[in-house]
Image: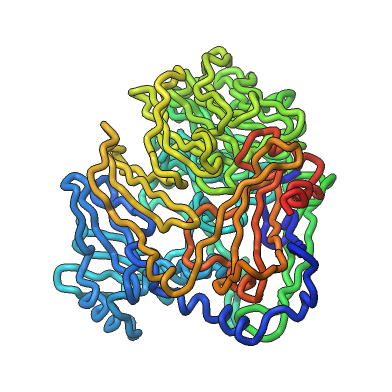
Amino acid sequence: MNFKLRKLANQWVRAICITSLTVAPALLAHGTLADYERAQALQAKAGGLVVNSPGAMTWIGDTDHFWYPRTVKGGTEFVMVDAQAASKKLAFDHDRLAEAISKATGHKYTGLALPFVPNTSRPDRRPIPPGTTAPLTFIDNEKAIQFGTGGSLYKCTLTDYVCTEDGPIPLPGPGNRNPSADYFLPNPQEIGGDPVDGLEYQSPASQDGDDGRYGRNQRACAPQHAQNQHPVARPARLGIGSQCPDQLPPERPEVCASFDGKWEAFIQNYNVFVKPVGDHPAFPLSTDGSEGNYYTFRTIAWSPDSKKLVAYHTQPSYDREIMYIESSPPDQIQPKHMAVHYSKPGDTLDVAHPVLFHLETKNRIEIDNALFANPYSLRPPAWWKDSRAFTFEYNQRGHQAYTVVEVDAKTGKARPLISETSKTFIYYNNLGPGLSAGRRYRHDVNDGKEIIWASERDGWEHLYLYDGVTGKVKNQITKGDWLVRNVDWVDDDKRQIWFNAGGAVPGEDPYFTQLYRINLDGSGLTRLTEADATHSINFSRDHKYYVDTWQRIDLPPVAQLHRTEDQKAILDIDKGDASALLAAGFRFPEAFVTRGRDGKTDIWGIIIRPTNFDPSKKYPVIENVYAGPQGSFVPKTFVAVSPDQALAELGFIVVHIDGMGTSNRSKAFHDVAYKNLADAGFPDRILWH
């Protein structure tokens, strides 16, 4: 079972259930013309009615400054905060900047409607194509900004307010996806997919602030200067009179540089080649590569001492394609068709095999696959900093075993460092913020002498401290009938973990996240947030400060700046105000809790009523069902107008419920979905009605 969601091809269960508080007559004819007109006008009517609502906080490099957008009457303002001084001010003169941008771009902008204002009006909107826009960035010691619109980058000085075009917007590279992009969306978006080349489809960004490739704690290659980088050739469409492809000069291959600056590794003719830096001939480290057994560049990883490297060779499988028709593409009238690579249950998969190379002897050591004989996917290799060994992670097909494998750098002998097993399934996506994050988390302490590992082995998602030398558990760090939802920061020096947990506060919605701190030995558990809401935490890069933002479906975001040392609140940043929204006749969704099929488990949901709701009348109930083990789906964050409000305006009550089989509760709660996707929480839903 693959728990990574595909927008195009794997919607698990998406259904609309219609029931009634009594018998609902003439459902198909429900709603008057006035109801439809009111529903159509909801978004426009609500625009600008929620003010002072803080948006995402963005820290500026290594400074104590950050900026954020906030809603104001008529649009959006941008605010700059100085954490050290505990002060805030407008980030720039909005009107002067709008005038300068209008002059540079040829499009008219106003101070409250700048071209980098976050678009939060439609959670279900189409994504913007890459290379079209670029986010606001403060540069030149905050004396200028950069942003992108219409495919072009622009730079604007904040001293004399002059804007100039700064070239095209670069396309994002691999691994640049924001891991929390689904945080405020009602349903999770695509996170990865089937394995490619035997590796997991997309390596999520590091949760520990590492800037190495693939989000690992140890870099795979040495950083290179721009003039030394050799981009991979991209296919081009040749026009009339163009040279034939075999007449074009060969593109230099993408290279992975050693850390001593002496060597470059790359893939040529399906094999691993190495050459000295400069104009020197290359030599092969492998000779067994072929189209049916090819080495992959993204698995090349140099040891920190630059004496060894690892690469995987892959045996490809059957590449199944499924055809789709897009009936209404945005750029043309006629439909389009496209092919999607999509493996089905039982299909063969690409299988990757790690190989260790000793540079001096050119010795090639194929790693015995006894510990990873039936892979769904492997993760790329990561070396210990002292070059004693490398590790990779093995996700067994069927997802009932997950192993951290360590390979000795001298002998190539593999051993299981951490072994995780389940009678049902292991939710192997990375732990992280949002409603659709997985349960996998690993943090190496003291170059792997100790390892923090997440597991549901006691029935709840908790953290464990491993001895990285013996592979034994030293102690369980967190414990209780609640779960760790995200790790914000590990302070290796103080041996403390800052993390978000759900369900640890009695009587509170268990899907809300609160911030905690705990010592690695399991002592000193301390709750650091108080509001009865879901909290998100944003640390400065040096972790001296953090912003706590909390909200509910009936509470606009509130943001507060804290000092990490003593957790003291030093600045009330902003507090959203929805009073005008309520005065205009809007109503918040209502949270509720009921008992599940077993008569004891709490099931949480929300109710959305029409704005003209009359408690003396009876309404048909439409339940919006999105159920699957890859997440939980009842919204927990604030939006001015619920995506279901328009449907409610037609004379319905709309309900969301997270029944058993969904995520973010206990392991037993989640396991209801095992080999039982058709359940979709219906027994819990039927009981509620």
Q: Nearer the viewer, residue 414 or 519?
A: 519
Residue drawn at x 26%, y 50% is 572
Q: Is residue 254 visible?
A: yes
Q: Nearer the viewer, residue 104 or 37?
A: 37
Residue drawn at x 80%, y 67% is 23
Say how the picture is coloured.
rainbow
Task: Tell me: 501 left or right of 395.
Answer: left
Q: Nearer the viewer, residue 349 or 586?
A: 586
Residue 469 picture location, percent across and down: 52, 14
Q: Is residue 507 above or below residue 74?
A: above
Residue 274 picture location, percent across and down: 53, 39
Quadrant location, the C terminus: bottom right
Task: Tell me: 393 left or right of 52.
Answer: right
Which quadrant of the structure image shows residue 570? Answer: top left
Q: Nearer the viewer, residue 88 or 52?
A: 52
Residue drawn at x 74%, y 51% is 685
Q: Is residue 132 above or below residue 334?
A: above
Task: Tell me: 414 left or right of 26.
Answer: left
Residue 472 picture location, percent across and down: 58, 14
Quadrant location, the N terminus: top right
Residue drawn at x 54%, y 45% is 204
Q: Is residue 444 above or below residue 69?
A: above
